[in-house]
Image (tube, grey):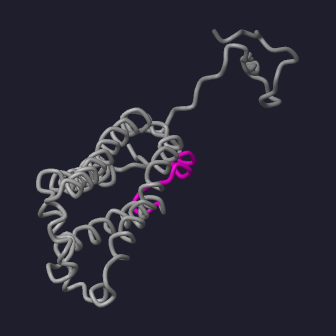
Amino acid sequence: MRSVLPPRYYYFFWLVEPLLTIAGGLSAIINPEDFGRNQLPDGIERLTVGIGGSSRGQMVISQLGSCFILLAMISLSLVYLFKKHLDDKPALLERMMKGLLVPLAIADLLHVFVTLIPLPMSHLKSPSEWTHIIHCTVWITLSLFVTRVCWLLGVGRPSARSLATASPLSKTGQRPIPLPKTDSELVIEQVVPKDGDSEGPRRRNTPRKTRLVE
């Protein structure tokens, strides 16, 4: 069955994205000291290198990790429920997915922006000097953003409108058979000409009989 949420998009939004987000959240919660130190190379702002070892730093970084996991739980729950209960209602499924993906796409761009804007200009222009956390944050988030935009633009999936205009198939894959006439329709038997009539076939003045289809 064709769907506005085909398997490649469904499993990406339902499993791949949440697992990546959970991994980032757990790394922040389990090891906030390394997470804070690896935000920037050690040569930049040496006074803040140990921010993850302070109580304030641990609170801020752990709260960030919990927000990551919260976003992952939302996708794990909603995408599954949308697919399970709305797959046969493409227009509603499409609206619900747009309602979920548009805010997330905006959040993706905001997340990349607030990650890069504090960097010194010399460091911002040299991605080769970025730490692995900056690389993961920027490139994974942009990959999620591109995938969301592709779905929103209808790339690689049918739209709800195209599914609505297509002729539906039955469960066996055949086109639906036209329904019989309703009981209220009358069927009048044709009149057969008399045998040996030399003037050719012609109708009698009155029909032989009239019956109602049961």
Residue 140 shown in magenta: no
Task: Tell me residue 22's x, y (percent).
Answer: 21, 50
Horizontally, residue 4 falls left or right of residue 142, namely right
Q: Is 33 placed above or below 168 here? A: below
Image quadrant where one finds the C terminus: top right
Q: Closest to the observer: 50 or 99?
A: 50
Residue 144, image x and y in percent? 33, 62
Left or right: where 173 falls relative to 16: right
Q: Nearest the camera: 167 or 161?
A: 161
Residue closer to the observer: 198 or 85: 85
Image label count: 0
Vertical comparison of 150 with 59: above or below: below
* Relative horizontal placement of residue 47, taking residue 115 as reference (left or right): left
Q: Is residue 165 magenta?
A: yes
Q: Nearer the viewer, residue 62 or 130?
A: 62
> Residue at the spot x=45%, y=36% of the render?
88
- Percent coordinates x, y for residue 1 in the rendering: 38, 43
Q: Quadrant of residue 113?
A: bottom left
Please identify the residue farthest to the right as the structure is shown: 205
Question: Residues in magenta?
Answer: 154-166
Write the residue at 46% across / 61% down.
106
Q: Position of residue 158 (x, y in %)?
A: 46, 54
